[in-house]
């Protein structure tokens, strides 16, 4: 049984009969499986993809609701500001965290250590969901109790986003030793949260906190925690970079030795997606993402586009037969040898973390703490793996890291979060810090849209760097206060 395969179709909706439901290991696994299923839903409905991409400029957007946000016309009524997808995951995770311990005494086959390993997965899923929420909205309600009946209090004020991440890091730290190093089945090993997934998420949240807090001592603490967490993954011995000629195997067939955590899909289990259509083969009405001029210009400047696997038909097209210039090749299912996925399977996995990101997160944290030489060596490790010659350290290591991330993780839902993280650090520690972020997220926009984005971000920073709370959430929860950059809309 595996979470990514939805062991049980358990949906404790409305009233959850806790006294009669939580009796066996299967009950616990079923609710955990539901949390993983909700994570897959958040990818399927494009919520997490859009949150990580639509305010950057590396992907051209076709869908109108996403384009409105890209163009600065951001309204609380826009469906893409809804956060229910993330809280669905959190709700299931909270249920496992609270009730799994009560099952140990009821089911002789369910021991304490196995219970804690499952709770470790639930903490990973909860922390990952809050990380998406904090990077998108900044301050959100911090729910850590399951909603089990209509008498439960579910109206909560917002909690400072940095405090949420601090608490989630603390919660994760208690479960590193319980989380499994490996699962016996590859779909579980990459599709369920291992110890290495917990460390990687800790590193990512720590890198964010180090960049977003204005106190240098606290900032350095989190950068050092990021480095230590990355080292735990690197020294674990289970993961490594795929070689250049094997890079595409990260995406086809997926679940590679480089993968740390990816959302699983299976055509045989009726778990499919629309990635190929969204990123490559869709019609004018169904294609959602295209490679932008901004991305192609940067890629051609940074890598050897003819010899780097990520450029030679690798990430975007026109070198590989059948792939046009604006297709995102990694989701097309075809490599440079024209190896094509058999049939219309539509079950490519969605990668959340892989080993290359651990190296680049460590590089960024090292650069922030003054160790620029080691940081640059790590950037070059990823850069040269692709097939490009060694970068020359021109002094701006952070820019080199951000540029390399834009190539390596292109169209993987990370670009806006990278821009925002660096922008927050610049805002906290450099007098002209806002300029870099605004420039990066206004490229390729029409003059009118660019002027709108520049005006709003200059006037409202940094509140306008986040999305507003959706109008329906404000109606349901009277304790919520709208993001200040949007609070006056409609008045």
Image: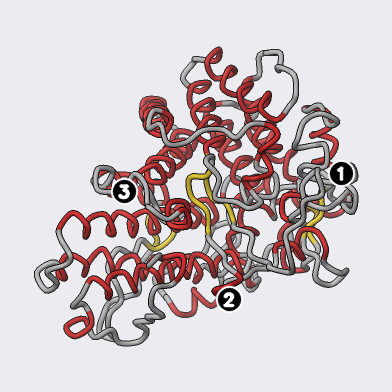
Residue at numbered disc 2: 270
- Residue 376 in percent (x, y) is at 59, 18
Residue 308, x across and y down, in percent: 77, 30
Q: Position of residue 305 (x, y in %)?
A: 83, 31
Secondary element at tag 1: helix
Name the residue at 77% across, 65% down. 277
- Give residue 485's quadrant in the image: bottom right
Label 3: state its secondary structure: loop
Q: Which mark is residue 293?
A: 1
Q: Residues within 10 Å of mark 1 (few under 14, many from 20)?
A: some
* Mark 2, secondary structure of its residue: loop
Mark 2 Cα-neighbour bin, 10 Å: few <14, some 14–19, many ≥20: few
Residue located at (14% from left, 72% from top): 107
CA gap, disc 1 to disc 3?
43 Å
* Viewer-closest of 349 and 150: 349
Q: How many marks?
A: 3
Taking depth in this image into account, of 220 and 434 the one nearest to the observer is 220
Instruction: Check if mark 2's residue and mark 1's residue have beta carbons within 8 Å.
Output: no
Which comes sooner in the sequence, label 2 or label 1? 2
Residue that numbered label 3 is attached to: 180
Q: Earlier in the sequence, mark 2 or mark 3?
A: 3
Q: Is residue 316 among what the camera can see? A: yes
Q: Is residue 171 above or below residue 218?
A: below
Mark 1 / mark 3, whichever is N-terminal: 3
| Relative height, residue 3 to residue 294 (above, below) | below
Q: Which residue appears at 65% of the width and 42% of the height? A: 409
């Amino acid at each position: 049984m595996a979470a990514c395969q939805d062991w049980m179709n358990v949906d404790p909706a409305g009233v959850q009969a806790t006294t009669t439901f939580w009796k066996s290991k299967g009950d616990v696994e079923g609710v955990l499986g539901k949390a993983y299923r909700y994570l897959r839903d958040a990818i399927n409905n494009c919520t997490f993809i859009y949150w990580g991409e639509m305010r950057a400029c590396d992907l051209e957007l076709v869908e109108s609701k996403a384009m409105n946000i890209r163009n600065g016309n951001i309204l609380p009524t826009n469906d893409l500001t809804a956060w229910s997808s993330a809280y669905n995951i959190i709700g299931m995770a909270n249920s496992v965290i609270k009730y799994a311990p009560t099952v140990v005494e009821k089911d002789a086959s369910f021991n304490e250590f196995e219970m804690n390993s499952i709770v470790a997965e639930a903490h990973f899923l909860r922390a990952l969901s809050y990380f998406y929420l904090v990077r998108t909205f900044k301050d959100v309600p911090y729910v850590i109790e399951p909603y089990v009946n209509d008498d439960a209090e579910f109206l909560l004020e917002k909690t400072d986003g940095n405090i949420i991440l601090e608490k989630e890091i603390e919660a994760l730290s208690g479960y590193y030793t319980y989380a499994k190093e490996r699962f016996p089945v590859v779909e579980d090993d990459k599709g369920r949260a291992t110890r290495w997934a917990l460390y990687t998420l800790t590193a990512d949240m720590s890198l964010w906190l180090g960049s977003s807090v204005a106190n240098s001592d606290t900032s350095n603490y989190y950068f050092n925690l990021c480095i230590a967490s990355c080292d735990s993954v690197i020294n674990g011995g289970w993961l490594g970079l795929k070689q250049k000629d094997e890079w595409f195997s990260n995406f086809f067939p997926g679940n590679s030795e480089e993968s740390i955590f990816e959302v699983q899909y299976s055509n045989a289990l009726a778990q499919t997606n629309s990635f190929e259509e969204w990123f490559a083969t869709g019609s004018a009405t169904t294609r959602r993402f295209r490679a932008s001029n901004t991305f192609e210009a940067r890629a051609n400047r940074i890598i050897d586009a003819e010899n780097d696997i990520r450029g030679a038909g690798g990430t975007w097209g026109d070198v590989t037969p059948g792939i046009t210039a604006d297709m995102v090749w990694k989701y097309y299912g075809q490599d440079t040898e024209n190896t094509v996925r058999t049939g219309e399977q539509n079950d490519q996995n969605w990668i959340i973390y892989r080993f290359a990101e651990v190296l680049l997160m460590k590089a960024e944290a090292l650069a922030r703490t003054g160790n620029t030489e080691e940081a640059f060596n790590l950037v070059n490790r990823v850069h040269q793996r692709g097939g490009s010659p060694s970068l020359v350290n021109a002094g701006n290591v952070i820019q080199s890291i951000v540029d390399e991330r834009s190539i390596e993780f292109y169209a993987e839902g990370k670009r806006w979060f990278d821009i925002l993280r660096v922008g927050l650090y610049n805002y906290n520690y450099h007098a002209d810090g806002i300029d870099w972020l605004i420039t990066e997220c206004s490229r390729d926009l029409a003059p009118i849209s660019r002027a709108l984005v520049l005006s709003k971000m200059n006037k409202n920073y940094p509140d306008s760097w986040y999305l507003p709370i959706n109008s329906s959430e404000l109606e349901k929860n009277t304790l919520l206060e709208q993001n200040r950059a949007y609070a006056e809309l409609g008045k």
